[in-house]
Amino acid sequence: QVQLAESGGGLVQPGGSLRLTCAASRLWFTIKIMGWYRQTPGKQRELVATITSDGNTEYADSVKGRFTISRDNAEKTVYLQMNSLKPEDTDVYYCRIGSASSFTYGATYWGDGTLVTVSA
């Protein structure tokens, strides 16, 4: 059973920073793509950022210039550095990994989510 361990969420003031971490274990495949999504209750889960095994990244327009995704292939870990946080960034953040270069194909797994709250 693939496991994704997320950490780093919490409460932060507007303008502050947080770093999310997601470590994968018990894998039966080589991770090709890793990413972060977020979801507000009652709304559709949305993409925040993705990164492929060769380092290509993609970001939602709302986080460009503020968030940075990175990965450690050897440690099977993906990070999301979030700076200049805004109240509208408040959400549950989910880690996702996939066996293909796009989440459209192959196997994919989700973490259980970590809550980020941006409030004064």
Image (tube, grey):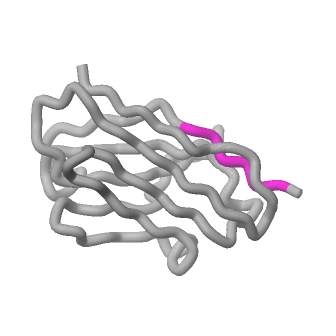
Furthest-front residue in this view: 74
Furthest-bottom residue in this view: 65
Q: Residue at x 69, y 52 (%)?
A: 90
Location of residue 31 with respect to 28 vertically, above or below: below
Is residue 33 in the magenta section?
A: no
Location of residue 81 with respect to 41 vertically, above or below: below
Q: Residue at x 89, y 57 (%)?
A: 120
Is residue 118 in the magenta section?
A: yes
Q: Residue at x 52, y 62 (%)?
A: 81
Left or right of 96, for residue 14: right
Residue 10, by quadrant, is top right
Left or right of 39, for residue 32: left
Q: Which residues are magenta?
A: 114-119
**Dominant secondary structure, magenta:** strand
Could you tell me residue 8's position as x and y percent? 57, 44
- Please count the marks in the image: 0
Q: Quadrant of the N terminus?
A: top left
